[in-house]
Amino acid sequence: MKKLKAHTRFHINIAKIEVFRVSTVYAFNETESLLEYWKENKFKYEVSTYFNHTVNKPSAFSLKQSAKDRRIENMNNMIFVRIISTLEVFLVDLIRDAFLVTKEPFKKEDLKIDMSHAEILSIKSASNFYNKIINKECRKLSSAGFDDIVKYYKRNFKIELSSFSPGLNKMQEYHDRRHLLVHRLGETDSQYRKKYNTNAISISINDDYIVDCINDIKSYCKMIHDQMVYQIKDQFSTNEKTSKIREKKIFIIIHFDQQMTGIRCFLEEYEFWSQDKYYLFSDIIDQRTTLDLNTIEYLISGTIPQIDDYISIIKKEGKKLNFKINSRKIKADLPKKKQYLVRELDELLLKSIEKELPEQPWETGVHKEIAIKLCVSNKLVSIGIQQLIAQGKFRRQIRGDVLND
């Protein structure tokens, strides 16, 4: 599976923030240097110099050191708030991306959507209904706190956000700082001082803190993205594939005497009944292939009554609309058995991976040997090793060479 769009958008947004920070610092430095030069040479403002350059009088741009420090502090505060907001947008967007790939994590028996008959009957396609579900889910998370998002990932995707570097405590501290900057203009309260054992009346964000924060967030989001891709591919995709009963599987080849498109019974939203149950053609279609201008092949599968009833319908339609139907059965799919005993990267599995890792440098393919021992996939062990490296428990290595970071 390729990278999910949320991760790409996150990197674009972070890159914009970094460019803004660098360019703003450059503008501050250049302006300060220019005004210092004007001051030293006693040039007059708003008057052209002998080298034909004019500088307007700085009404609010002070050259005092306190003013310089305040400019950088204000810039860092605003950038920090934007960085944490970018993280939260990523965490919600990643859920939206997961919904596009699989609906399994969102199937909840305890949650109901209140809709009137008018609303239900006004829905033109399944996509309209899906939008209503995921938009409600994401809107709720967007207004929730970081702790609620952590619980959501654990409950719905079995992803422990607390296990990813730089760790839950530091991520909570980032969010608490953002809260103080947004709601108290940086002034601490008793709860913050007690939680982080500090007497500081206010907080400030310096350059080193910003750089560390950006690096932490980048690493954090990458590991979450990789774990989400793994969960979708390994855990939820199997459930989703087996959720459809395939008792009968058949190819049907439709040949028209002349080029025809849009016949109702071959549209995905076509509705039909089977054994007093309502279905759409999209419920049974697996594949559509255009063989030539007059011939289309469909692969359909489902329960025996579903397929038989649909075949009966299109045979009747064929007589009316003058198209020919050929079919050939193929062996129905059997659900694949799960290959692994463990399917989520929790703290216990992470410790097991750490215990199995030998001293560095590691030989190529060490993750495969550990995967066999722990009855998990190669990908899951690989993600775990990257987390352990990010936590500082091991060092990065390329082609067997340990890097000196």
Image (cartoon, rainbow, N blue to C red):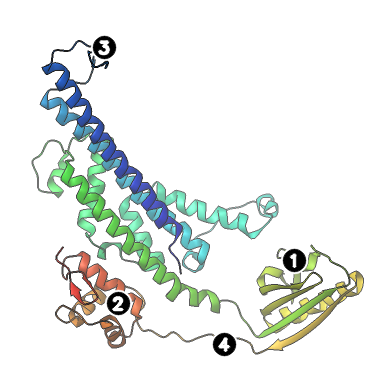
| Amino acid type, residue under disc 3 in the picture | Ser
Judging by the rendered image, the residue that carries numbered circle 3 is 48
Residue placed most toward the observer, 403 or 337 = 403
Tell me which numbered mark, 2 or 1, is placed earlier along the sequence. 1
Measure the C-alpha gap from mark 3 to mark 4. Answer: 84 Å
Q: Is residue 333 above or below residue 292?
A: below
Tell me which numbered mark, 4 or 2, is placed earlier along the sequence. 4
Q: Is residue 118 above or below residue 155?
A: above
Taking the view exactly as shown, the residue that stands out farthest to the front is: 51
Report which quarter residue 199 is drawn in.
top left
Tell me which numbered mark, 3 or 4, is placed earlier along the sequence. 3
Measure the C-alpha gap from mark 2 to mark 3. Answer: 67 Å
Number of the front mark, 2 or 3: 3
Number of the front mark, 3 or 4: 3
Number of the front mark, 2 or 1: 2
Q: How many marks?
A: 4
Tell me which numbered mark, 4 or 1, is placed earlier along the sequence. 1
Judging by the rendered image, the residue that carries numbered circle 4 is 334
Helix or strand or loop: what does disc 4 sit on?
Answer: loop
| Amino acid type, residue under disc 1 in the picture | Glu
| Amino acid type, residue under disc 2 in the picture | Val
Residue placed most toward the observer, 222 or 140 = 222
